[in-house]
Image (spheres, helix red, strand yellow):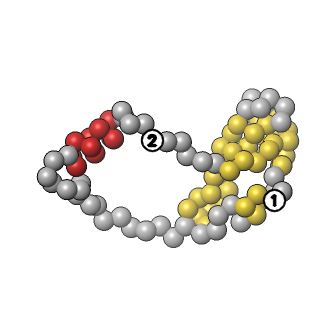
Amino acid sequence: MKIENQIMAYCPYCNKHTLHKVVNYSKGAARGLSVGTRRHNRVIMGYTGSAEVRLITKKLGKNQKVLLKCTVCNKSVERLLGGRTKKKIEIKR
């Protein structure tokens, strides 16, 4: 899925349509001290091996997410593009 590197979009901070720079969304690192991580580490600790595996149904595709960075106020807004797709996002240069 190809997308332009700059698009006109609504900025909720400027309260108007402005030119936005399109940036690939990348998820940050997980927190090591969060409750879920500590619980998982406690389950897999010792001789038990790995945690119990839940059967997960495979989705046919993922929603592609991009960050739109306003060129006026430099604030970022997330946007999901289209429905589920197997194609990754490619930003035109």
Looking at the image, which residue sits at the far left?
Answer: 47
Report crowding for label 1: few under 14, some 14 to 19, many 20 or more residues within 10 A (C-alpha).
few
Measured in 3D between alpha carbons, the distance from the residue under mark 2 to the one under mark 1, in whole angstroms, is 30 Å
Q: Tags 2 and 1 in contact by the CB under 8 Å rule?
A: no
Does 62 sit above or below residue 20?
A: below
Q: Is residue 1 left or right of residue 57?
A: right
Report crowding for label 2: few under 14, some 14 to 19, many 20 or more residues within 10 A (C-alpha).
few
Question: Splitting the image into 4 quarters, where does residue 19 fall?
Answer: top right
Task: Using the image as rendered, state which of residue 13 and residue 23 is in the foreground.
Answer: 23
Circle 2 — which element?
Answer: loop
Q: Which residue is mark 1?
A: 92
The answer to whether one can see residue 79 in this image is no
The answer to whether one can see residue 74 in this image is yes
| Residue at image coords 45%, 41% | 30
Q: Position of residue 28 (x, y in %)?
A: 53, 42
Three-letter amino acid code of the residue under disc 2:
Ala
Q: Position of residue 71 (x, y in %)?
A: 83, 36
Circle 1 — which element?
Answer: loop
Looking at the figure, which quarter contains the C terminus?
bottom right
| Residue at image coords 67%, 56% | 81
The numbered mark, 2 or 1, whose residue comes first in the sequence reads 2
Looking at the image, which residue sits at the far front?
Answer: 47
Residue 54: assigned label: none
Q: Position of residue 40 (x, y in %)?
A: 28, 45
Does 71 sit above or below residue 52?
A: above
Question: Splitting the image into 4 quarters, where does residue 1 fall?
Answer: bottom right
| Residue at image coords 64%, 68% | 87
Q: Which residue is mark 2?
A: 30
